[in-house]
């Protein structure tokens, strides 16, 4: 091992008597450094062992936490299965009982939808810009008697500009009262066609121009002035009536409209508000506002005008106003709402009605089970079976986790306490190992159950084999089939022997917990001792280094005086 010293080396004459001094002192330093390194290594091994012991404790807690009940109790978990998950799925709570049901879904619940009584927006006119309608700049192609005409759309063009350009090509463009675009030939004898693969504007596709039997082109979509970017209270908003600032209500939520509120921001506010219990949508093609309930069932969406006439303009309410703009009377137009339908299902022949597709036990009377409807049964489906059973998967996984943790625990302690190992002679560890091992093979009759040994429920010591000839092997193995059978035949006894008040896992938890206790437990006590030793070794090393530096410095001074006096 190489040791370097601060403050040494700068021109020192390495005479043999200095080297001899350093050599003697170096032996003491090397011994201390070895002790420090060894102690740190022991602390690392102790930390690793503690982690393994903690993992064992965690593995048994999965069972012993059953005393807290609810989701902590693995023994109480159940599973609900549908024979046709296209029709419904199901979940089971801890209080669900093992049972089967025949379920037939006649109809699922749907959502109520309110839609503007008539278009709330004005139809586009000659002054309406094409850009505001979502029509992009570019060109599209028309053919009159096969002769090609390219119609150019530039930023800022209006509907009137487009009409003029089409007229020059021999086509008349008109907009009906309901916003439908109609292209007809100016000369009745002419034949017109619209659209080409070379078109760069989205005009034809956006409005959905299609030819009819009369040789005209008619849009499948209407064009309206108002868009989601429209400021609601602006004079040029494009709505049929001027919208004024103020409030209105949807569901239990109140919304405010000011001079900066756009249709887009208002829709977002509605959709993000849980109290509204609804989603809003603006349909450009119809110029109408739609509001859909977030709750299923045959219930109206509450819509109130408030101090703003917004819901009146949208055709969802009807109000009378005084000269100062205050509502005198107001009513919701129920005819604008298409009521959703309730869910109907039959459970073992008994008809059940639910306002939601999530049908809980208070409706079905199936304790602890929630049914989630997906669609109605068809004749081909027949009835769908709901099976409620004990959920053994969690218990099985927990047993496998325990056995893995137990085997690692035994292997770790055997390794670190063996002759010559870093924790050899630690009786607390070997005692802990022996106690845990003894508990796994002991007979437990304290709970009075049908099972007294872990081996009776599939948890047993691994038998000697060609790969493991030791008859006293500390490893445990798991017989899943035997465990599941025991759980099926007597689940209460399985729970008692594992996690009862005096169950085997409960006693293992208590035993392991003693070693992991803060301050007084073996691991904390041992760690404190090691930390103290480490600090002591560090301090001794620092002192010895300092003494050696001081001695060598003095030797240098004496040597300098000696050579200077020659």
Image (tube, grey):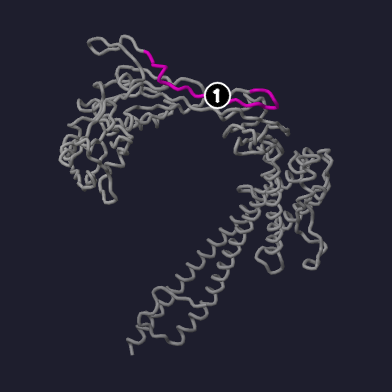
Which corner quadrant of the image does residue 423 belong to? bottom right
| Residue 349 belongs to magenta span | yes
Corner quadrant of residue 5: bottom left
Task: Report the span colored magenta.
Answer: 331-351
Q: Is residue 290 left or right of residue 32?
A: left
Q: Is residue 231 something that shows in the picture?
A: no
Q: Which residue is at 47% across, 71% downward?
A: 545
Above or below, 218 against 178 in this view is below
Q: Is residue 299 above or below residue 168?
A: above
Which residue is more in the foreground, 17 or 92? 92
Disc 1 is placed on an element classified as loop
**Picture coordinates of residue 496 (x, y %)?**
77, 40
Vertical order, 113 against 471 (above or below): above
x, y (%) of residue 552?
42, 77
Residue 357 horizontal side relative to residue 100, left or right: left
Residue 188 higher or lower than 49, as above or below? above
Where is residue 47 shown, x and y percent of the image?
60, 58
Neighbours of disc 1 within 10 Å: few (<14), some (14-19), many (20+): many
Residue 412 relative to residue 190: left or right: right
Q: Which residue is mark 1?
A: 342
């Amino acid at each position: 091992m190489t040791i370097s010293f601060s403050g040494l080396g700068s021109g020192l004459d390495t005479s043999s008597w200095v080297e001899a001094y350093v050599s003697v002192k170096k032996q003491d330093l090397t011994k201390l450094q070895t002790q420090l390194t060894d102690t740190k290594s022991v602390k690392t091994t102790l930390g690793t062992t503690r982690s393994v012991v903690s993992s064992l404790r965690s593995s048994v807690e999965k069972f012993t936490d059953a005393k807290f009940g609810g989701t902590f109790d693995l023994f109480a978990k159940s599973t609900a299965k549908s024979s046709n998950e296209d029709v419904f799925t199901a979940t089971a709570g801890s209080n669900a009982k093992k049972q089967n049901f025949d379920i037939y879904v006649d109809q699922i619940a749907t959502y109520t939808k309110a839609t503007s009584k008539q278009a709330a927006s004005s139809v586009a006119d000659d002054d309406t810009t094409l850009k505001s309608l979502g029509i992009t700049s570019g060109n599209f192609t028309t053919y009159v008697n096969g002769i090609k005409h390219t119609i150019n759309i530039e930023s800022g063009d209006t509907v009137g500009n487009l009409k003029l350009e089409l007229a020059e090509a021999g086509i008349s463009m008109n907009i009906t009262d309901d916003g439908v675009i109609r292209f007809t030939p100016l000369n009745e004898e002419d034949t017109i066609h619209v659209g080409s693969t070379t078109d760069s504007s989205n005009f034809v596709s956006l409005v959905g121009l299609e030819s009819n039997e009369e040789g005209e082109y008619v849009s499948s979509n209407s064009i309206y002035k108002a868009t989601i970017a429209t400021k609601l209270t602006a004079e040029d908003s494009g709505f049929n009536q001027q919208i004024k600032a103020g409030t209105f209500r949807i569901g239990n939520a109140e919304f405010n409209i000011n001079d900066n509120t756009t249709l887009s921001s208002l829709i977002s506010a509605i959709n993000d508000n849980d109290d509204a219990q609804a989603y809003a949508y603006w349909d450009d093609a119809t110029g109408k506002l739609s509001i859909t309930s977030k709750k299923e069932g045959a219930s109206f969406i509450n819509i109130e005008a408030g101090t703003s006439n917004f819901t009146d303009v949208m055709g969802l309410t009807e109000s009378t106003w005084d000269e100062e703009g205050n509502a005198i009377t107001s009513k919701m137009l129920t005819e604008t709402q298409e009521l959703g339908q309730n869910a109907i299902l039959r459970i073992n022949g008994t008809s059940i009605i639910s306002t939601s597709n999530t049908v809980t036990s208070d409706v079905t009377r199936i304790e602890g089970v929630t049914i989630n409807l997906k669609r109605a049964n068809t004749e081909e489906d027949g009835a769908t079976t709901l099976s409620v059973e004990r959920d053994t998967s969690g218990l099985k996984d927990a047993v496998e986790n325990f056995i893995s943790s137990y085997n690692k625990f035994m292997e770790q302690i055997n390794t670190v306490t063996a002759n010559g190992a870093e924790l050899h002679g630690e009786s607390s560890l070997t005692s802990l190992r022996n106690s845990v091992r003894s508990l796994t093979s002991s007979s437990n009759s304290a709970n009075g159950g049908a099972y007294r040994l872990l081996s009776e429920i599939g948890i047993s010591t691994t038998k000697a084999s060609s790969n493991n000839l030791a008859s006293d092997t500390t490893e445990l193995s798991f017989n899943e089939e035997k465990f599941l059978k025991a759980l099926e035949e007597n689940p209460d006894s399985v729970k008692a022997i594992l996690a009862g008040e005096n169950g085997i896992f409960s006693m293992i938890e208590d035993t392991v917990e003693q070693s992991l206790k803060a301050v007084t437990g073996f691991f904390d006590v041992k760690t404190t001792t090691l930390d103290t030793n480490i600090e002591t070794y560090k301090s001794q090393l620092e002192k010895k280094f300092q003494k050696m530096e001081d001695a060598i410095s003095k030797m240098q001074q004496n040597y300098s005086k000696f050579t200077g006096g020659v």
